[in-house]
Amino acid sequence: MLKKKHVLLSIVAVLALSMVFAGPALAGKKFFAVATGGTGGTYYPLGGALAQALSTKIPDLIVTAQSGNASTANLNLIRSHGIESAFVQNNTAFQAYTGIDQFKGNPVKNVRGIASLYPEVIQIVTLKSAGIKAVKELKGRSVVPGDRGSGTAVDAENILKSAGMSFKDFGELDWLSFTGISQRMKDGQADAGFITAGIPTSSVMELTSQTDIAILSIDDKLIKKICDTWPFYAKVAIPAGTYRGQDAPVNTVAVMAQWVVDAGIPESVVYELTTALWEKGTHVLRKSKGQAAEAPSAAEIMGKVHAKGKDVTLDSALDGMAIPLHPGAAKFYKEKGLIK
């Protein structure tokens, strides 16, 4: 099932799979991939943990996590059947399915939902020395709005539109991953960067260890305009102390990170994946060795590897789900009484 793409296997998944499915044990196994994001974001570690957890619980299935270029690029892979599933932002998933904005004339009609995972916070990170206090003060500055083709870049564009601006207003513009943004700002070659991810974000934490930064607070009037124009966004506050030197809460907006899948994946497979995401199960390798075989849910594992994993709960599994559910996922949620 796995389509070969020029993407790197998640280190976490590779290590886990090398231990769990070595040698002859690979015979008869099917492969299933999850496209995540850059190594400096939240998708990457959570995707690796998800892949490891699913592979230990679902017989005859090897799940791998692959680093990618985030939402828009991941959805393009779904369209071309180049990947089985992916982590994406809910607003970008809606745009893809309905064929609007960057997907105009080229919709992704084969994308289906498995679950909403956690809120992704839009963080406008600035060098403290740049003295930027408002979105409009980004005009004429060197700014990185995320990686080309990413959901972060779409978020940056939407915020700028609401403020009556565009990318053309920047003095310098570059397209980089979260890690690239961090490095560019450490080198003093960028005044600000947009990062949409679960908080705390590793690349921002790494940046704060070497450079004094500020997270730009968006004023209430602009937040209202953003949320009225794009109902996927919601006002949130980054709690004080989330990052070094951040002594006060920061007002901004957020979207939901979602796990989506190609509609062509069999219902039975997606049902197993959804069940393994939310429920405890049997550890297939330990059972074969006669050991204690209970395995935690994939959501529990995700909660142990990253702070945002603790926000992955069944209660919010359908929050912001604006695309059709895959029948396999819908079957699980019907059994739980979450949908009719």
Image: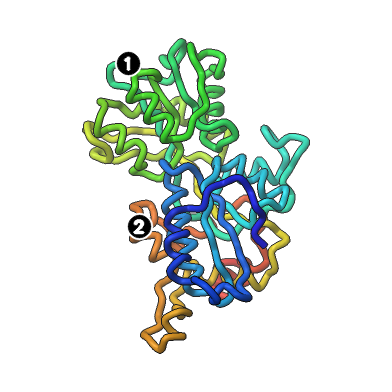
x and y, in percent, of residue 177 in the image = 47, 34
Asked if the residues shown at circle 2 and circle 1 are in contact, with their CB atoms under 8 angstroms apart, the answer is: no
> In this rendering, is residue 265 above or below 185?
below
Q: Is residue 310 left or right of residue 48?
A: left
- Callout 2: SS: helix
x and y, in percent, of residue 194 in the image = 45, 30
| Quarter of the image where the C terminus is located | bottom right
> In this rendering, is residue 299 above or below 169?
below
Three-letter code, disc 2: Val
- The residue to which callout 2 is attached is 305
Residue positioned 55% across, 28% down in the render: 158
Three-letter code, disc 1: Ala
- The residue to which callout 1 is attached is 130
Q: Is residue 309 left or right of residue 275?
A: left
Q: Is residue 61 visible?
A: yes
x and y, in percent, of residue 234 in the image = 47, 40
Q: Quadrant of residue 167?
A: top right
Task: State the separation of the CA atoms marked 2 and 1.
Answer: 34 Å
